[in-house]
Image (cartoon, rainbow, N blue to C red):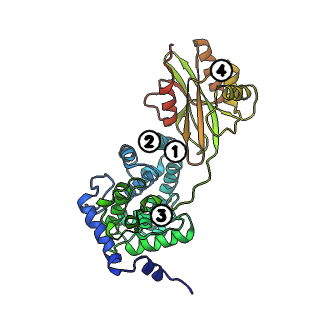
Amino acid sequence: MTTTKSDELMAAYPAIDDLTSFGTRVLEWFEREGRHDLPWQYHQHSSADIYAVWLSEIMLQQTQVATVLGYYERFLQRFGTVEALASADWQEIAPYWAGLGYYARARNLHAGAKQVVAFIHQNHRFPQTVDEWQAIKGVGRSTAGAIVAMGVRGFGVICDGNVKRVLARHRGITDDITKSATDAKLWTLATALTPRDHSGKYAQAMMDLGATICTRTKPKCERCPVSKDCFAYKNGSQHLLPIKKKAAPKPHRHSAVIRVHHQGQDLWIHRQNGGGIWDGLWCLPLLPLASDAKSGLDAQAFKEAVMTAWQTDDGKDLMMAGFTELLPLMTTPTASLRHTLTHFHWHLYLLTWVVDEASAQNINQMLDAMGVEYQWHTGADLAKPVAMTKLVTDAKSLSA
């Protein structure tokens, strides 16, 4: 016997009043207790800036509101329209994303801006539908729904991590939410519950509900507008839901970070690696270390790894080969940290050299000959990765 979406809805919401009142209760709560002063919110305005809504949705992916606020406003001041973003070079954009992390989002946003500008030139309007937005690079189904609901002011449905957590707990969905069948069930629920006339405000309300009330840990159920018919609340199973299969462990990589210090300044390289990690940012040079260790290296293991990397050409680019010729071998890090990226854990170990004028000039000549963009700088106000800032900050004070 085939199960229809209607059957799934009735199984999740046997009481039709609960189904129809869910959105009303969430919206009423949002009016009373929700956030209404975020710069990308347009529900209290007669129209919305579609580009600004899109930008905020990309920045907010896997990033907290408090972190995004400053970046969002600076980014819009520099790239105030989709045309301005599309016409900019990536090297111009990267500094305005530096420190926000997940740089693939920014590269996709840049590529998407070019697509949107082409779409506008052809159609004389922004994309309007979920399908049109999903054709834009970096825009998935939920992001497209959010843009349509909050930016375009059409009917759009969101079903991001916050919404899935709320619905899984509320309706007692005990299947793995990473499974396609469970995902489809959650989307069916999310679509049915979204009010046709207020999908933008409802989308913001559901984001707020998941971010501030139905949180992953220590949910505030006593303040939740839909707790009276919540399965998890009734059964005390909030900590168990949603059920999500554990991701495979991330691999670990190890690199020595080369800090060359001269007269109060460090040597910074403008990293240009074709869209790779930290592309477009200013970084200290990196020396890959051959190690499959799944944690930070102890002193002896690090010493052996650095000695091997220093004395062989494996994994070294031309610039790093030059550094290993001009600088003496050093095996004691002045700072270290583990930096977690989307696909791996990166263990970084800071090695520090204080060099004289002659050594600094030799390094300059090497980099000039290679066409490498570099500068001697204190690091203040440079567009650089957070990990680099932390390493230098944690390092012991240097004497010139």
Q: Which mark is residue 96?
A: 2
Amino acid type at circle 4 is Met
Amino acid type at circle 2 is Tyr
Q: Which mark is residue 330?
A: 4
- The image quadrant of residue 295 is top right
For marks 2 and 4, give the CA distance.
34 Å
Q: Report the mark closest to the observer, 4 or 1.
A: 4
Which residue is tagged 3? 119
For marks 3 and 1, give the CA distance.
21 Å
Which residue is rendered at x = 52% and y = 65% of the image?
Answer: 177
Which residue is rendered at x = 52% and y = 32% of the image?
Answer: 388
Q: Secondary structure at mark 1?
A: helix
Q: Position of residue 269 (x, y in %)?
A: 57, 30
Amino acid type at circle 3 is Phe
Mark 4 or 1, nearer chain start: 1
Amino acid type at circle 1 is Trp
Furthest residue toward left: 32
Which residue is tagged 1? 90
For marks 3 and 4, give the CA distance.
54 Å
Q: Secondary structure at mark 2?
A: helix
- The image quadrant of residue 172 is bottom left
Q: Secondary structure at mark 4?
A: loop
Q: Position of residue 333 (x, y in %)?
A: 59, 24
Mark 2 neighbour density, 10 Å: few (under 14) some (14–19) many (20 or more): some
Mark 2 or 1, nearer chain start: 1
For marks 4 and 1, give the CA distance.
35 Å
Mark 1 neighbour density, 10 Å: few (under 14) some (14–19) many (20 or more): some
Q: Position of residue 44 (x, y in %)?
A: 25, 61
Q: Secondary structure at mark 3?
A: helix
